[in-house]
Amino acid sequence: MNWRRALRLFLWIAGVCGALVGIVMIFFETWTVPGDDAQFAVSIEPTLSVGDFLLVRRSSGTSYGSLVRCTDPDAPARFVVGRVIGDSSDNVEWTNGTLLVNNRTPSSSVACDPPVVRLKNPGTQEDEDFQCFLEEVGGSTHPALRAAKAIPRDSKAIVEPGKVFLASDNRLLHLDSRDFNTLAPGNCHRIALRLWSANGWLDAKKRLTVLW
């Protein structure tokens, strides 16, 4: 292959790649998870971490079990992230640390690998251990955290018509509808893919991870 053929092949590949990227960006936007709020940062663990580079759908809307980024109702220039675990008229409650939706508990019998995650509690500034388990909601499986020792306060809510209830995957150190109430799905966008983590492309466990 002479240099002219090689150049044409390179330009063809570059054009195809550029077109594919352009098509993707019509439907998705990129977003890097910010690290300027310690409570937000710990609430999104273990599914997401500060510095993750994500693809987020441009069109709004939610579905049961989806991980979404929503406009923060208390600070419209910021975002909150949570998993949709309830919609119109659903009964959502925590009893002794166990999540119940319409009196049913999502499947959570399998431990993560590793089964324990250590995080710093932004309230006490001390490291705490959390049990990590795989939970099935809406036909998809995701990791979630519960306290190894402490049990969160019991709570109960009936989701308002036209609203959704978000739960942090960190069920103890949360920033979700227990804190800011239910949200309109029109203010939420599904998180689709993690392209890479704060550790970069070489972090194989958090590279090209489907999240929805």
Image: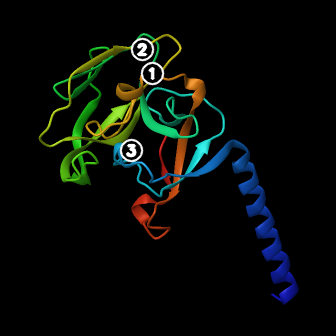
Residue 184 x, y percent position in the rendering? 54, 22
**Residue that lies at the very extreme toward the bottom in this rendered image:** 2
Q: Which mark is residue 182?
A: 1
Dots 1, 2 in contact, CB < 8 A: yes
146 vs 41, left or right, is: left
Q: Residues within 10 Å of mark 3 (few under 14, many from 20)?
A: many
Q: Which mark is residue 156?
A: none
- The residue carrying mark 3 is 44
Residue 3 x, y percent position in the rendering? 84, 88
Q: Amino acid at mark 1?
A: Thr
The N terminus: image quadrant: bottom right
Quarter of the image for residue 6 reads: bottom right
* Rendered view: 61 above or below 110: above
- The residue carrying mark 2 is 159
**Among numbered discs 1 and 2, the one appearing first in the sequence:** 2
Helix, strand or loop at mark 3: loop
* Rendered view: 76 above or below 133: above
Helix, strand or loop at mark 2: loop
Q: Amino acid at mark 2?
A: Val
* Rendered view: 154 above or below 47: above
Q: Residue at x 21, y 22 (%)?
A: 154
Q: Residues within 10 Å of mark 1 (few under 14, many from 20)?
A: many
85, 166: nearer the viewer: 166
Helix, strand or loop at mark 1: loop
> How far is the residue under mark 3 from the one under mark 1?
17 Å
> How far is the residue under mark 1 from the one under mark 2?
7 Å
Q: Amino acid at mark 3?
A: Ile
Residue 185 x, y percent position in the rendering? 55, 24
Q: Residues within 10 Å of mark 2 (few under 14, many from 20)?
A: many
Q: Residue at x 26, y 53 (%)?
A: 119
6, 129: nearer the viewer: 129
